[in-house]
Amino acid sequence: AQKVTQAQTEISVVEKEDVTLDCVYETRDTTYYLFWYKQPPSGELVFLIRRNSFDEQNEISGRYSWNFQKSTSSFNFTITASQVVDSAVYFCALSDLGQGGSEKLVFGKGTKLTVNP
Amino acid sequence: DVKVTQSSRYLVKRTGEKVFLECVQDMDHENMFWYRQDPGLGLRLIYFSYDVKMKEKGDIPEGYSVSREKKERFSLILESASTNQTSMYLCASSLGRTSTDTQYFGPGTRLTVL
């Protein structure tokens, strides 16, 4: 069965520190997709990245970077030089194609990041 | 930009009431989803729909039903609200069912059942 584990429930850092959020997944599919979402205090989930299982290249977007390692079934997210505005709950998600091709996502339980000034 | 809107940000209802949560997307997406979010449990899928008048049960459909009469609108119905349905409800949509497209979320409805 599809499963996503975010072992870190809460992380607290001081501004300008680097922080890595861990995501480990289990899947039965040979082709799958991984996602990261950010949920600020306002509540809306904001899409950050979508990664195909065939593409193991690391990705960098500004202060954000993602490390996808198929060998360890991990898709970790690093924020460099964290800022107070990065404070949010971050969710990792895994595609679940299911029967008939209908698509769903399986979410981890989230990691609450607090960045203190 | 993809826009997913939900009818209310906050809602307070009484036990036994029938509750309608509405979700509208403006990007002609095929798929629409309803989740509930609870502390320590993350997001759990209630129902989803990949076409008008089509619906599939998610992981926790009990106590809920859905309606999709038009492509852009997906309604979640609590037939007889109970206190254990107090939660944050999130609606999402994605492009189509031929690939795993990104789901885009609405702002959420925080429902309290008294």
Image (cartoon, coloured by chain):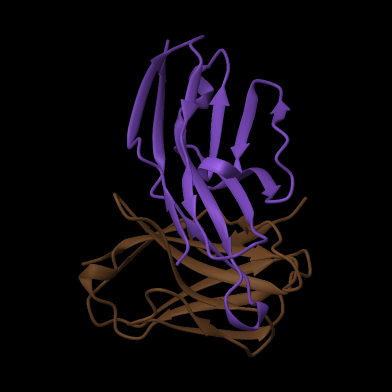
Residue A72 or residue B36, whichever sits in front? A72
Occupied quadrant, residue B110 = bottom left
In the drawing, does residue B13 fall left or right of residue A83? left
Residue B56 place in picture, x, y as percent: 53, 83
In the drawing, does residue A48 fall left or right of residue A22? right
Residue B14 place in picture, x, y as percent: 24, 73
Give the residue drawn at x 48%, y 50%.
A25
Of all residues, the one furthest to the front in this rendering is: A71
Classify A99 as above or below A81.
below
**Numbered circles on residues, count:** 0
Colour applied to chain A: purple
Classify A8 as above or below A116.
below
Give the residue drawn at x 63%, y 26%.
A64
For the question of whether residue B111 can be seen, the reply is: no
Quarter of the image where the C terminus of chain B is located: bottom left
In the drawing, does residue A86 fall left or right of residue A51? left
Give the residue drawn at x 46%, y 76%.
B58
Residue A82 place in picture, x, y as percent: 53, 16
For the question of whether residue A81 can be seen, the reply is: yes
Give the residue drawn at x 39%, y 81%.
B64
Classify A28 as above or below A83.
below
Residue B99 place in picture, x, y as percent: 74, 67
Give the brown chain's letter.
B
Residue A48 or residue A42, whichever sits in front? A48
Residue B84 or residue A51, whichever sits in front? A51
Occupied quadrant, residue B48 = bottom right
